Amino acid sequence: MMINSTPSPPLPNSLEDSLIQVSDILRCASATAYETGDNLDGLKRDLAFSVVHLINMAKAELERSLECVQNPDSPDET
């Protein structure tokens, strides 16, 4: 029998729960990339901080989607 040492996250109950869970994962990924970049120099530092930027762009899109799920009657501002 194989023991899974990585805890499995709870299954989301709804689309909103899933989006919130993904937001939390992106926040952790951004913090990890930032801390990694903070300890690097030169091109490796630039690369790590570009990952932070990409994660933050994805998080912004996710938050817009979450807003649409939470307020389905509000007009889309795009």
Image (spheres, rainbow, N blue to C red):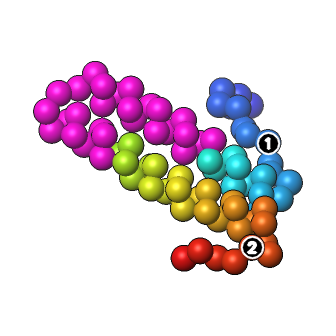
Find out whether residue 29 is within the magenta segment: yes
The first of marks 2 and 1 along the sequence is: 1
Q: Residue at x 73, y 40 (%)?
A: 9
| Residue span colored magenta | 24-50
Q: Specify the amino acid type for callout 1.
A: Pro
> Which residue reaches farthest left?
42
The residue that appears at 61% across and 56% down in the rendered structure is: 63
User: Is residue 2 at least partly visible in the picture?
Assistant: no
Residue 25 in the figure: left or right of residue 17: left
Residue 52 horizontal/vertical position (percent): 38, 43
Residue at 54% over, 62% down: 61
Q: In the rendered view, does 78 fall on the left or right side of 17?
A: left
Q: Is residue 71 above or below residue 47?
A: below
Check disc 2 and report the residue beneath it.
74
Q: Is residue 48 above or below residue 73?
A: above
Question: Is residue 78 something one can see in this rendering?
Answer: yes
Looking at the image, is mark 2 or mark 1 nearer the viewer?
Answer: 2
- The Cα atoms of the two marked residues, 2 and 1, are separated by 30 Å
User: Which residue position holds label 1?
Assistant: 10
Tag 2 secondary structure: loop
Q: Residue 20 location in percent, x, y?
A: 70, 49
Q: Residue at x 69, y 77 (%)?
A: 75
Q: As drawn, which residue projects farthest toward the right? A: 13
Quadrant of the rendering where the C terminus is positioned? bottom right
Q: Amino acid at mark 2?
A: Ser
Badge 2, how many Cα within 10 Å: few under 14, some, many 20+?
few
x, y percent for residue 24: 63, 41
Q: Are marks 2 and 1 in contact (CB under 8 Å)?
A: no
- The part of the image, by quadrant, that contains residue 1 is top right
Give the overall secondary structure of the magenta segment: helix
